[in-house]
Image (cartoon, helix red, strand yellow):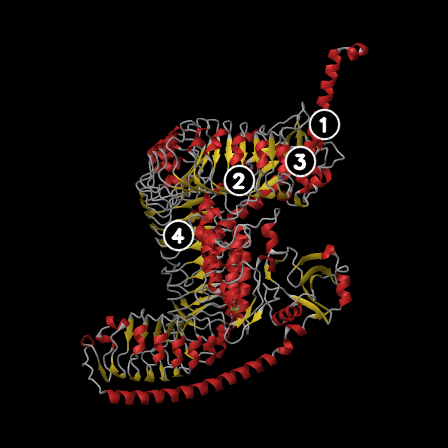
Amino acid sequence: METIIYHSPFGLLLLCILSASIAISATNITTDQFALLSLRSQITTTDPHHILAKNWSTGSFICEWIGVTCGSRHRRVIGLNISNMGLTGIIPPQLGNLSFLVSLDMSTNNFHGEVPHEFAGLHRLRVLNLDVNNLEGYFPPWIDSFHELQYLTLRNNSFTGPILPSVSNMSKLVTLRLSNNTLQGNIPKELFNISSLEIIDLNGNSLSGSIPDSVCDRLGSLIELDLSFNQLNGHIPSSLGKCSQLQMLSLSGNHFISGYIPKELGNLKMLHRLDLAGNRLEGAIPKGIGNATMLKSLNFVYNNITGATPKEIGNATLLRYLNFGHNNITGAIPREISNLHNLEFLSFEMNKLTGSIPVEIFNLSMMRIFGFGMNQLSGNLPSTMCHMLPNLEQLYLEINNFTGSIPNSISNSSRLNLIELSHNFFTGFIPHSLGELRFLEVLNLCSNNLVSDSSSPELGFITLMTNSERLTMLEMCENPFNATLPNSAWNHSSPLQYLYVYSSGIKGSIPDGIGNLTSLVTLSMKNNHLTGSFPDRMQDLQNLQGVDLLRNKLSEITLNSFCVFRYLVGIHLDENQISGSIPECLGNVTSLRDLSLGFNRLNSTIPATLWQLKDLVELNLSSNLLSGSLPPEVSSLKVATVIDLSMNRFSGDIPTTIGKMQNLNYLSLSHNRLHGSIPESIGNMLSLQSLDISHNLLSGSIPRSMETLEYLTYLNVSFNNLTGEIPSGGPFRNFTSDAFISNAVLCGAQRFHVPPCPSIPSHRSKTKKVHRTMFILLGVIIAMGAISFGFVYLRCRRKDKLSSGEDLSLVARPERLSYFKLLQATNGYSESNLLGTGSFGSVYKGTLDDGRVVAVKVFNLELEGAFKSFDAECEVLRNLRHRNLTKVIGSCSNPDFKALVLEFMPNGSLEKWLYSHNDCLDIMQRLDILIDVATALQYLHREYSTPVVHCDLKPGNVLLDETMVAHVSDFGIAKLLGQDNITFTKTLATLGYLAPEYGLEGLVSTKCDVYSFGIMMMEVFTRTNPNDERFGEKMSLKSWVNDCVPNGITHILDANLLRANDGEYFIEKLDYLSSIMKVALNCTVESARERTSIEDVLVALKKIKLQLLPYKANSLAISTANITTDQSALLALRAHLIQPHQILQKNWSSSSSVCEWIGVTCGSRHRRVIALNVSNMGLTGITAAQMGKMWPKVCDAHFFPHFSTCSSPSKLNILPFLD
């Protein structure tokens, strides 16, 4: 038979066709293999799990490679899935040769660059997923050639430019996700002609224009429409009501300036989520919204909505999240809200609601957040209000008109972590049951009419609260307690940081046990009836920053007690009965910004050390018995804005140096015994707004230089011996005669009620000018001599002081380590021990003989400046000791070898954490790190005897220890400042972080570090390096941030921090991050003089952190409670699988974090498993029943196609948000 076929023409033809077919097939599978090997070669960093390096080999058949699927007919590559592999590199154009490709998934890696235009040849493509990479360039114009494409998702990249109208050529498109890019221009109306579309997600871009009225004419299958956080304007089309299948509609964070909420949205019977937050919507909430009975989340926060809340809202009984806060809603709270039995989050904060809260609302047992603060609500809270609220975590009822007592039942909500009841009219006792709330962190009862139990003279409730294990803030101010603070309070340590008990009729003395509150930051007990002294134990409060005991009857306080507080920012002891002198040691509290000791009985002179507080902003010593003269050093307070020394016994002249205080707004020297003339230099105090030097013995004339004080609105020079003409220009045009009464012989304009000035002959005028000039010259010579003598004296004294402390310096303390010890410790400075390289050398990990793990910084002495860098680090680090600075353990210094041995930081640098694909810092971690760095800078700039400027602050020079505490390192180009706090340098730091004055002029001051810190803040929260290639002459990281804060902030933030699925926390997080970016912009003001100080930055960051605490506590509670459940579920799945490559068996281990396992993605907020992708791994088995426990958090799951039997858990059916 074979012979017959061979010799027949038909047989020959068949043989030729078969041979050609085999040849074509062999050629094309080789093409596919070459394309994939090209991709492997472009991965610049070896994939962390070595999957491609080991598996993609020419020694094995391409169709057996991990992530590769071949067609059964042509044996060509039809599917490629390399998602979640941590790969870094560019996408090669050869991938465009995979002409049979149907599905391509490269998501959740670190691919960068542009998508090659050769992709246009992938005509068979149905699925394209490039989510979560660093891809950039214009939105691909050739993408319209994908006529078969059904699934296109490019989320979380950096694509720019417009979405082209030709996108409508993808007529089979079902899912389009382009969120969190920087796309611009209008949304093409042609997009809404693709009738197959079910999901449109364009949130987090810069799209503008309006939504076309025809949006839903052809989108009968649309399930999800997310256009949030763009720059859309116009109105919300009523035609959206025609998208009858719509389940999610989010338009938040836009600019709908001319719109109302369309009533037609109530026609969307399938709608689960409606988010219109952060727009400018007006008008009332339409009643028809209640017809959307499938709603689970309804968010209208931050609009201008008016009118009453429709009672029909109670028809949406599936609602879990309802936020109408920050609007102008009026009327009563509808009783029908009590029908929403699934409600977990309810907020009407900051509206104009009236009436009482319907008692039925307190039966919503699922409630976690309950917010009606800042309204006009009234009435009593029901005694049973918390009987049915076991899950309540936060209660906001502040700034209303509530009356009656605080119900005892509040303790039934045992999960409460925040209670805000301030500024109401509550009466009666504070329930002792509040002390039973083990999770309570913040309690604010200020500004009510609460009283203490009359059966005891003590405020017993405070004992219960200060013994709480978690309470950080306790506010009980402005209540008529009229009681003493119990000695039994504060018997043991407490986490309390903020204690406010001011204006509450507190009597007796401050209990000694308050010294146990070692975490205390602010203590405010002003406007009470406290007597006695400051307890000795108070000196244990080493974290104390603010003390406010104003307006009490304290008489035995010695101000020496305050000299021990290293971080003290403010002291308010006005209006007490304190006597004695101001101690010299108070000048050593260099952190002081506000010192107020007015209206006491202080005597003697002001110590010279007080004028050394160069960062003092406000000084009030008025109404005491202080004497002596005002020294020239008063001008050292260059940043001071308020100085009040009135009502004392000061004598002598007003120093001429006072003119150097150009930031001063308020100066009062009235009611003293000052004599001499008003100095001409006072005209240099350009910021002065109020000046009172009345009731003294001043003589001479009023200087005409004062006419230049354009901001001066108040002046009082009355009751002196002034003569001559009252100036009439500048601010004097607005002063009345009251400012000048009871002087000797003043003359001038009639409105001042003084006689007109006589004309003076010219020769007398000239003689007078000559005499005046001679007197001025003589005065200048004497003053210069005195200043020179003082300068030499201070320099000598300073030199003696420094030399006397030299023996105790850090250089003497570190160990001297030999070259051979370090050679042995670092295994011969092997590459495996190399931690990194810097500008002047390399850093190695080492283990000393005693087992200590250290970092050895070896200086490359062949580099120019290396010797100087080593000397600089030694000079800076020898005396510095601070928790947030790198600790020096030892050194090795020979003529040809120099090294520093530093404390090892196991978590590496901040830079590593920012740009690592596997590691992700949350908001609080980033904020804590920045606070650590700011604290270190405050120490360097203000708290060390000689100010130190780091000069090269950047994420690479911030190291993290095992507990993620930040330590500033690398002082190789640091500068020690002289007395002027300014120096010059030719050494440039890292470009991108340089302050303008540093880069252009070489001018170095502490404000250079502040600028670098601001740039670093921007980098930390945008995850964008200031030297990124997108920046150039026209745009920098700073200008980019400035252009986008606050309205476009979502376009610049690290996508891991802010996502639309953050639900109720989205707007709050946005506000906090906007505040952080504003602080960063204040740090980077062009003018060093106008730039904020590191102290103000630190205060601002700590304030933001305090606001974030409730959010963070909620996140942690959820995370720690449930991540173990996820781990158990995944390990159960692993046990049910047959794994040919053993990937999961090796990688899914209980010794590593679940969130680092292959195929697993965790949410940035809860750190719960939100995505599971185990496709293309050749797995066989069934899904474990335990997986059902994990489903409520999972939003993306891929098992297909390799499961022979797939028995999905029943709980899978309840996932409304499953993609």
Q: In the figure, residue 1148 lies in which quadrant? A: top right
> What residue is pinned by disc 4?
421
Residue 783, percent from left and from top = 42, 86
> What residue is pinned by disc 2?
155
Give the residue type at disc 4.
Answer: Leu
Labels 2 and 1 touching (C-beta < 8 A): no
Element under disc 4 = loop
Which of 621/956 is in front?
956
Precedes in sequence: disc 4 or disc 2 = 2
Residue 956, percent from left and from top = 60, 58
Marks 3 and 2, Cα distance to the nearest angstrom?
25 Å
**Disc 4 or disc 2, which is closer to the eye?**
2
Element under disc 1 = helix
> What residue is pinned by disc 3?
35
Precedes in sequence: disc 2 or disc 1 = 1
Precedes in sequence: disc 3 or disc 4 = 3
Q: In the figure, residue 217 lies in which quadrant? A: top left
Taking the image as drawn, is residue 217 in sight? yes
Precedes in sequence: disc 1 or disc 3 = 1
Give the residue type at disc 2.
Answer: Arg
> What residue is pinned by disc 1?
26
Give the residue type at disc 1.
Answer: Ala
